[in-house]
Amino acid sequence: MLALAAAVVLAALVASCGSVRYYSQAVWGGADVLVKRKPIDRLLEPGRARVLAASTRERLSLSQEIRDFASRELGLPDNRSYRSYADLGRPYAVWNVVAAPRLSLEPKTWCYPFAGCAAYRGYFNERAARRHGDRLAADGYDVRVGGVAAYSTLGWFADPVLNTFLDYADADLAALIFHELAHQVVYVKDDSAFNESFATAVEVEGVRRWLRSLGRDEELAAFESGRRRRRDLNRYLLEARTELEAIYGSEDSDERKLARKAELFRALPSRYRSELVPAWRAAGDDAGGESNLGGWLSRLNNADLVSVATYNDLVPAFRALLESSGGSFPAFYAEVERLAGLEPDERRRALDSLATGGPEPLEPGPDSR
């Protein structure tokens, strides 16, 4: 998920002429989200039962239980974020544009005041996002435009619970809230992989502890199964990245590289069906949704593989760091802060060292408060 909105809301003050249109939509879009916020505790008052559907009230109540757990047990910020609700009247909060050259996996980056550089550009309007994606494609980039349910303002504003994710499954709702709050703990300018992998590590362990605390063992088992499938898929996609990097770095002509690239992408769905799905079934994991996933794989390009790396490359390193911190989130955050203060190359070397032989899922840790 994305840590951008605070920067774009403030950046209109210093935008150049060429970026005024982009920052203007960001300011108005971000302001619209903030204006629509309503305090959840007020919405849940008994006398306001007619204001919201019973199902919405139930989900909002659950969101507050998750929010309480986040600060009480995971050491995440105890502030007004996710204490309000906004119905945006649309399916996504923002639409992200991700791009990479057709013969490279190095993402195009955009730089913003305050937040630094990131490998995506966010729009509050889908049509505007797709127009920008079309311009990049015309310039020779592989492009992916996708809707995103939530983003973080890094604590500049009190982020609300949104209709775009309120109906997520319980574990997914908790994961999203934990992930976005983690961005408020540590955020490093110009290092998307660090920021997203750190938040993903917090999200995953947070959900495990939350489900255990409620004795929801079946849901925990389903969550673990889903995580295993996701790790397998990530490894599969990272293998594809490695093959593509070899193609792009070869002495072949650009025409030959493009042909080899197209051949690799065409083969991905069949490789998935012949390699991953049987392994999941043999392990007793539900391979549901495999046809949808196969369809997604058939549409992949370089931009999709950029995103996979951004959110997952460093997760094993952060999980190893959490384990070496005795499972204590405050101690873990202190170590992450220390890493954040290193120079980029030194920080990456430290994380690569941590990732070597990184641990599998943690057992229940000590009290994390």
Image: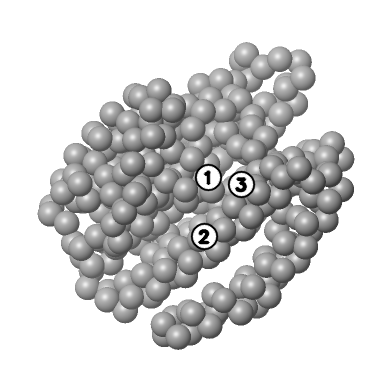
**Residue shown at 27%/74% (left/top)?**
216
Q: Position of residue 218 (x, y in %)?
A: 31, 79
Q: Are marks 2 and 1 in contact (CB under 8 Å)?
A: no
The local secondary structure at tag 3 comes to: helix
As shown in the figure, which amino acid type bears the numbered disc 3?
Val
**Up/down of 332 relative to 262, above or below:** above
- Mark 3 to mark 1: distance in Å? 6 Å
Q: Position of residue 53 (x, y in %)?
A: 48, 66
Disc 3: CA contacts within 10 A as few (<14), some (14-19) or many (>=20): many
As shown in the figure, which amino acid type bears the numbered disc 2?
Asn
Q: Which mark is residue 306?
A: 3
Say if residue 162 shows up in the picture. Answer: yes
Q: Are marks 3 and 1 in contact (CB under 8 Å)?
A: yes
**Residue shown at 65%/43% (left/top)?**
105
Which residue is disc 2 drawn over? 234
Name which quarter of the figure residue 183 lies in.
top left
As shown in the figure, which amino acid type bears the numbered disc 1?
Thr
Q: Which mark is residue 310?
A: 1
Q: Tag 2 or tag 3, which sits nearer the N-term?
A: 2
In front of the other: 39 or 148: 148
**Residue shown at 31%/44% (left/top)?**
354
Disc 2: CA contacts within 10 A as few (<14), some (14-19) or many (>=20): some
Which residue is situated farthest in the front direction here?
251
Q: Is residue 216 left or right of residue 246?
A: left
Q: How is the image coloured?
A: one colour
Disc 1: CA contacts within 10 A as few (<14), some (14-19) or many (>=20): many
